[in-house]
Image (cartoon, rainbow, N blue to C red):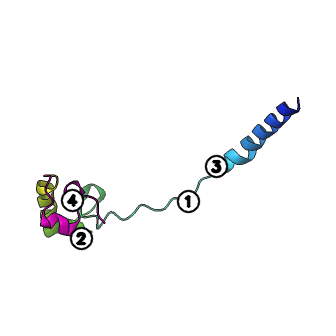
């Protein structure tokens, strides 16, 4: 009989103290700024004026070239130097 009392008290403790504490809202870090990730994303408002790091003509050209070459199975010098083709060159160090 005493075992059942301990079982019920433990269940009561967890349901009143532990589980509500686990379910509390915790602050969430704001999302990282997507500008500067080397991909021009007009869908989220990136333009050449708002994010030149991603949307300048030069960077758009580089992105197109990377898509044409990255994934061909050969780690070219350009891919190695930029570190932006893990498919060919492995993960960044």
The residue that label 4 is drawn on is: 89
Chain part drawn in magenta:
73-93
Identify the residue shown where x is 83% and y is 37%: 6
Place of residue 56 in the rendered image (x, y in percent of width and height, measured from the top left) = 17, 69
Residue at disc 1, secondary structure: loop
| Number of the front mark, 3 or 4 | 4
The percent coordinates of residue 38 (x first, y second) are 24, 64
Mark with earlier residue (3, 2): 3
Q: Label 4 neighbourhood size at 10 Å, few (<14), some (14-19), many (20+)?
A: some
- Mark on residue 53? 2
**CA gap, disc 1 and disc 4:** 37 Å
In the picture of the structure, the residue carrying the numbered disc 1 is 27
47 or 8, nearer to the observer: 8
- Disc 2 packing (10 Å; few <14; some 14–19; many ≥20): many
In the displayed structure image, the side of residue 8 where residue 92 appears, left or right: left
- Choose the circle earlier in sequence order: 2 or 4: 2
């Amino acid at each position: 009989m005493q075992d059942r009392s301990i079982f019920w008290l433990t269940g009561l403790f967890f349901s009143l103290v532990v589980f509500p504490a686990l379910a509390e809202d915790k602050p969430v870090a704001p999302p990282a700024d997507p500008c500067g990730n080397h991909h021009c994303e007009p869908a989220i408002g990136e333009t050449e004026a708002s994010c030149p790091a991603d949307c300048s003509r030069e960077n758009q050209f580089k992105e197109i070239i990377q898509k044409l070459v990255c994934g061909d199975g050969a780690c070219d010098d350009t891919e190695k130097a930029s570190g932006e083709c893990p498919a060919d060159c492995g993960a960044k160090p």
